[in-house]
Image (spheres, rainbow, N blue to C red):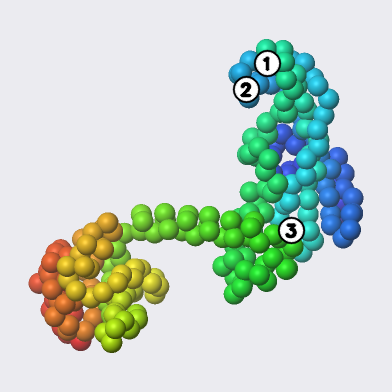
Amino acid sequence: MPIVKDLSFYLPSKKLKFLGSRQDSGRTIWLTETIPTRQEVCPRCGVESRTFYGRARTRLRDEPLRSETLYIEIIKQRYYCKSCRKPFTEKIEGFNKNQRSTGRFMKFIAEMCEQFSCIKDIQTRYQCSSSFTYKVFYKHQETKVKEKINYPWPAAIGIDEHFFTRRKGYCEYATVFTDMCHKRLFEMVRGKDVKGLLKQLAHLPGRENVRWVAMDMSSSYLNLYESFFQTHRSWQISSMCCAC
């Protein structure tokens, strides 16, 4: 099997060229450089510049390679803008200013947050800072919430109540809606009164998709069913009663 010496195909940007690699304190560092263009647009004034102004180095943390810590060191071209009389560094597509890690590494940490039971273990295992790990984790959760907003009602659901808390001697409950098609939690809202449930569920699309409902014969949930899930009402009620 031939030995591959050029790893440019593995780099996060097509504008980067692989130069070599070295080891530094147990970490693998890939040396790369950008393929310079004849002209670059100044980010301040928007005027094209053709004057080179030396080079700059930056280092980004990348996804581990065979469990080894990997960094990518990039040599970037600098330009001088004659309009605003200030130098600037070329922009690499896919990288933001002052970014210190690649998108692949952030995606990798987000996946590890799903597998590890404690975020502190991720910090220790992959030598990440606490602020970076939590930032990636909450950004990943925000993305999942946005996906959840566009997630319509499934064809088969389960409805049940669960004890939530006790305040001033009164029990408070939460209503749980289960996606029976994919066997996972669909939604959880506070309370079990019909008026409160309708208000909390109004933003969820696709209620007409529901065809089967598994629940107890609670009057609150029966009223919720009749007032919220309206498609094929009589057929659903008879099917539900037989299941119960």
Residue at label 3?
64
Q: Quadrant of the N terminus?
A: bottom right
On the image, the x and y values in percent for residue 148 come to 39, 59
Q: Which residue is mark 1?
A: 84
Q: Amino acid at mark 1?
A: Cys
**Residue drawn at 64 percent across, 56 percent down:** 132
**203, above or below 118, in the image:** above
* 23 to 15, vertically: above or below: below
Q: Is residue 72 visible?
A: yes
Task: Give yes or no for contact between labels 2 and 1 (Cβ–Cβ under 8 Å).
Answer: yes
Q: Secondary structure at mark 1?
A: loop
Q: CA distance from mark 3 to mark 1?
A: 41 Å
Query: Which one is earlier in the sequence, the residue at label 3 or at label 1?
Result: 3
Q: Nearer the viewer, residue 1 or 202?
A: 202
Amino acid found under the numbered disc labelled 2: Arg
Tag of residue 44: 2
**Which residue shows up at 79% across the image and 61% down it?**
68
Which mark is first along the chain, 1 or 2?
2
How crowded pointer 2 is (Cα within 10 Å; few <14, some 14-19, many 20+) is rated as few
